[in-house]
Image (cartoon, rainbow, N blue to C red):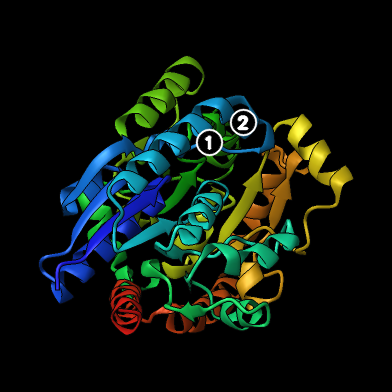
Amino acid sequence: MVTKFVIVAGEPSGDLLGSKIIASIQDLCPDATFEGIAGPKMIQAGCKQWFHSSELSVMGIFGVLKHLPRILKVRAKLIKKILKNPPDAFIGIDSPDFNLKLEEKLKRRGIKTIQVVSPSFWAWRKNRVKLLNKSADLLLCLFPFEEDLLKEHNVNAVFIGHPLADSTQQKIDVKTARNNLKLSAKTVIALMPGSRGSEINRHAKLFFETAELITNRIEDIEFVVPVVDSKIGEQLKKILAMYFTDLKMTITDSTHSALSACDLVITKSGTSTLEAALHKKPMVVVYKMSQLSYWFLKISKMVHTDYIALPNILLGKKLVPELIQENASSETIFAESLSWLSNQHKVVELQQQFDSLHLQLQKNASFLAASTILKMLEQQK
């Protein structure tokens, strides 16, 4: 069966997941075609690019507002293009603020819609869940608790596991990773300030200041920073050259190698916290946003979760420290870092929790996504 898909992803993580779903669908249905909003990995997997995924990569309430006219223009062009030559199905990967409205319009026109990655309605803006069955014929979620919550609201939801759990080995080879990165220090710390320019502006200098404090306290230590692209790498190198010339710092394009090699991760909140957990690493989670966005979230009472770090959310308890906004200083990050580095027993207990989380999320997500999508389309022919 020849199946034509339009697919949209707006983040590096969405681009990666999209590429794996494309490959898995093509394994099951070799004649399937894909076009839409794609990043480099989806293009490599065979997707024809209409717009680059970076068009949708904005963050924060006011960051979105700033770019809203451009984003709406892209969506209008996309709808026009889709309706001119309708596909068998539309697949939206994450980016819910962009995809769900688009899916709603397409569903009304009779096009089958699949949303991969549930919006975090359980964490903030919980009323969004009421709109999901109007937008998506099928919602593929990455976390086990989401499926039941979504079904309570009449959403056709299927838990597929998390692709990061599939691509990360249960046992991590620290020695090989250190050799590959040419790291020889006794202690290695991974710094993950973010994948967007705005995140780097808020977190990088703070993380490097913390690295200085740690270097002054602990002998024989190195730092490694994984980056998603060369542009972020250059941004970090400029900051290091201007202010932190004495730090032993390695910048790499391999997140897996950096996380495998390290003893501790200092990271902004987001998917990187789950990546660290799947690599069984202790972490300190930090998040800063613009004061305007932070103030707006506080007064609007839009946040409905006790935690920001995914490992804490998924395991239902505060296993790793979270330092938010004014509580995130180089001194507080330094203190939490030392707490991990000086307590191996606490680290081992954490790793046991992360082992069970890994097994829970390891379901062969891209194959499950592909087979579920094709089964739905076959049933509805």
Q: Which amino acid does label 2 sit on?
A: Gly
For residue 309, side relative to residue 26 (left or right): right
Name the residue furthest right.
299
Residue at the disc numbered 2: 63
Q: Is mark 1 on a helix, strand or loop?
A: loop
For residue 74, side relative to residue 317 (left or right): left
- Residue 40 vs 25, above or below: the answer is above
Which residue corresponds to the image point at 36% horizontal and 30% vertical from the top-left?
Answer: 233
Which residue corresponds to the image point at 46% horizontal and 38% vertical from the top-left?
Answer: 75
Which sits in the foreground, 168 or 12?
12
Task: Indicate the position of residue 320 as horizontal and vertical percent values.
Answer: 64, 64
- Residue 350 vs 226, above or below: the answer is below
Circle on res. 348: none
Which image quadrant for residue 257?
Answer: bottom left
**Do the numbered discs 2 and 1 sit on residues whose CB atoms are within 8 Å?**
yes
Circle on res. 58: 1
Name the residue furthest left.
30
* Camera sees residue 334: no
Comes first in the chain, label 2 or label 1: 1
Q: Is mark 2 on a helix, strand or loop?
A: helix
Q: What residue type is labelled 1?
A: Val
* Camera sees residue 1: yes
Task: Indicate the position of residue 349 as horizontal and vertical percent values.
Answer: 58, 79
Which sits in the foreground, 155 or 290?
155
